[in-house]
């Protein structure tokens, strides 16, 4: 298995509310059928799908609690951390930890989306952001099979 993640699917209680939350953060998503939403997120996709459908599809019991996973969004400065946390709160998220300096010289804060998914917003001066790569649905009308094409920068030039 290649060391790569192509898609993270978040189980949500209300697809319309969840989509609106992420769109208020400035994300732009597409839905082939109104039941799932795909957001291009750099070199991968973040999908929103009904929590019950996701549990059935992955053959797991949904106890409704935190699943031991936190998503992260790195930014270029401590000010950007605070801006993203403010945006998330305005969009309906809950800031559970305000931006604060870290022991390793960075700056982080946490917000939780309306479905309980925690996001760390982090500035790490030792981890510079790389050019954005794009991931795209294969020629599948329902976008069920996702794959990454050779990485390209925002300008379309190959990333080396």
Image (spheres, rainbow, N blue to C red):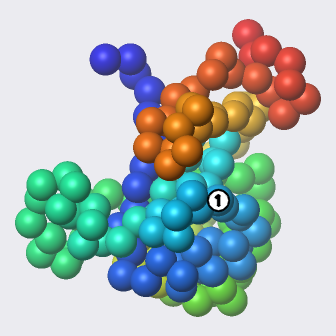
Q: Relative to residue 100, is residue 153 drawn left or right?
A: right
* Residue at image point 52% right, 64% down: 33
Viewport quadrant of the N terminus: top left
Q: Residue furthest front?
A: 141
Q: Position of residue 58 (x, y in %)?
A: 20, 52
Viewport quadrant of the C terminus: top right
* Image quarter of residue 144: top left
* Residue at image point 68% right, 21% down: 151
* Residue at image point 59% right, 62% down: 31
Q: Relative to residue 114, is residue 159 drawn left or right?
A: right
Q: Nearer the viewer, residue 93 or 28?
A: 28
Q: How many marks?
A: 1
Q: Position of residue 34 (x, y in %)?
A: 53, 70
* Residue 27, visible in the rendered structure: yes
Up/down of 51 relative to 128, above or below: below
Using a 10 Å C-alpha cutoff, classify the residue at mark 1 as few (fewer than 14 neighbours), some (14 to 19) or many (20 or more): some
* Residue 110, visible in the rendered structure: no
Q: Residue furthest left?
A: 61
* Residue at image point 77% right, 55% down: 77
* Image quarter of residue 35: bottom left
**Of helix, strand and loop, which one carries label 1?**
strand
Q: Nearer the viewer, residue 92 or 143?
A: 143
Q: Relative to residue 158, is residue 7 drawn left or right?
A: left
Q: Position of residue 138 (x, y in %)?
A: 56, 32
Q: Position of residue 101 (x, y in %)?
A: 60, 63
Up/down of 112 relative to 54, above or below: below
Up/down of 26 relative to 2, above or below: below
Question: Circle 1 is placed at which residue position?
Answer: 30
């Amino acid at each position: 298995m290649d060391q790569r993640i192509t898609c993270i699917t978040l189980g949500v209680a209300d697809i319309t509310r969840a989509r609106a939350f992420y769109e208020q953060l400035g994300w732009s998503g597409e839905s082939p059928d109104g039941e799932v939403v795909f957001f291009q997120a750099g070199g991968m996709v973040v999908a929103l799908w009904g929590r019950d459908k996701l549990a059935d599809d992955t053959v797991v019991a949904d106890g409704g609690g935190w699943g031991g996973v936190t998503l992260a969004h790195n930014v270029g400065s401590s000010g950007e951390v605070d801006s993203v946390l403010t945006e998330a709160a305005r969009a309906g998220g809950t800031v559970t930890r305000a931006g604060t300096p870290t022991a390793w010289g960075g700056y982080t804060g946490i917000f939780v989306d309306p479905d309980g998914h925690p996001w760390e917003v982090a500035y790490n001066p030792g981890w510079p952001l790389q050019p954005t790569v794009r991931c795209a649905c294969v020629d599948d009308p329902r976008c069920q099979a996702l794959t990454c094409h050779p990485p390209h920068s925002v300008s379309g030039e190959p990333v080396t």
